[in-house]
Image (spheres, helix red, strand yellow):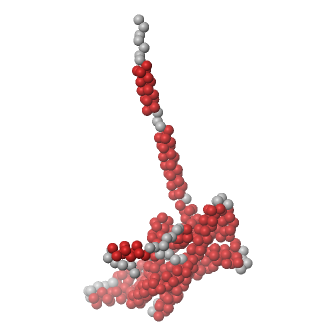
Amino acid sequence: MEPENPPESQQSTSESSAAVMRSDSKVPRWVIKAITLFWLGWAVTYIGTGMLRNLRGFLIIVLISLFLGFAIEPAVNKLERWGVRRGLGVWIMYLLIFVSIVGFSAAIGTTLATQINNFIDEAPRYVEDAESWLRDNVDEDIDLSRVTEEFVDGGGAADLANRFADDVVNLGTTVVNVLFQTFTVLLFAFYIVAEGPKLRRTVCSFLPPARQRAVLSVWDLAIEKTGGYIFSRGVLAVLSAIAHWIAFEMLNVPFSVPLALWVGIMSQFIPVVGTYIAGALPILITLIDSPRTGVFVLLVVVAYQQIENYLFAPRVTAQTMEIHVAVAYGSVLVGSALLGVVGALLALPFAATMQAFISGYRQQFEVEEDALNESATRRGRRIT
């Protein structure tokens, strides 16, 4: 007897079930693509992060080179209009910078060395004065003669001088490294400025016309704002140096000229903490000779800072690099967090460039004064 064939409905049901099982066991193509893209992105991110970490020093050198190039290019362009070749113009600017740095360093170094020697020579007198004050105000039996003997006869002064000399020697390796990095920065900046037109043409040759205009606009803004930053800082440094020199002369502060130069330069070219670093040196030097004069120097530094913030700085920066105080402070914090001291130095010109670029391309709308007044009225005050 022949077996009965299953009904066609049962056969089709079993075939569809098998097809569903086969389709369920097969991974969708989009899942495989998503997994592949995820791991590929992770690998690229991991490798890129490692490369950036290893190349951080080189990238900082490139940023400093760009900053230096943008800073001196306006002067080089002016020299070129006077008939000086761009390469020679760059070397002239390098020579001026080198002479300024050497002269400033020599003046400050001489001041520090002289004050250290004076402090060592006058240390016994300072101990005697302290002993006399303590006997008059604390205890008549206090005797600090042993401190004087240990400092002078026991070699304390010699140890102080030797430690200072050892620190100078230990800085030798660091100085060599800094000189090498400085040479690299100067070399890159030289080609950025000397070959500036050719470099811009090469970069723009890889871009469509619309983006060429945007790149050239940002480039020109960076040069303008960086040059304006250096110029404004230089003007404020000169004003600060002159004002402090006059005040130091009136107070009979020793080494008034180098100390005034120190205050002027350090307070302007080191963001955020430059004012405190600039004022610390003349205050400490005058405190050694006369505490009363040191207090007056402190008052002079604080008073001039207020005059500069509210009188000089707004008028100078308005003509060169106008940027809101909050934006400037925030950009310095972000730059220092990302790149340390270099980031703090480059933050202001970068922020000014981005601010000028955005303000030139964004669409602005007229503010409706009625809406503002209605909003102010609802809050209980009126904008006038």
Residue 23, percent from left and from top: 46, 31
From the viewer's side, name the closer residue of 135 and 7.
7
Q: Residue at x 57, y 62 (%)?
A: 58
Q: Residue at x 39, y 90 (%)?
A: 292
Residue 222, percent from left and from top: 58, 70
Q: Quadrant of residue 272?
A: bottom left
Q: Is the residue 51 above or below the residue 228 in the image?
A: above
Count of marks, rendered view: 0
Q: Quadrant of residue 319?
A: bottom right
Q: Residue at x 50, y 79 (%)?
A: 268
Residue 42, percent from left and from top: 49, 49
Q: Can residue 131 be seen in this snapshot?
A: yes
Residue 287, percent from left and from top: 41, 86
From the viewer's side, name the closer residue of 6 and 113.
6
Residue at the right extreme, as displayed? 83
From the viewer's side, name the closer residue of 296 and 25.
25
Q: Residue at x 48, y 44 (%)?
A: 34
Q: Can residue 185 be seen in this snapshot?
A: no
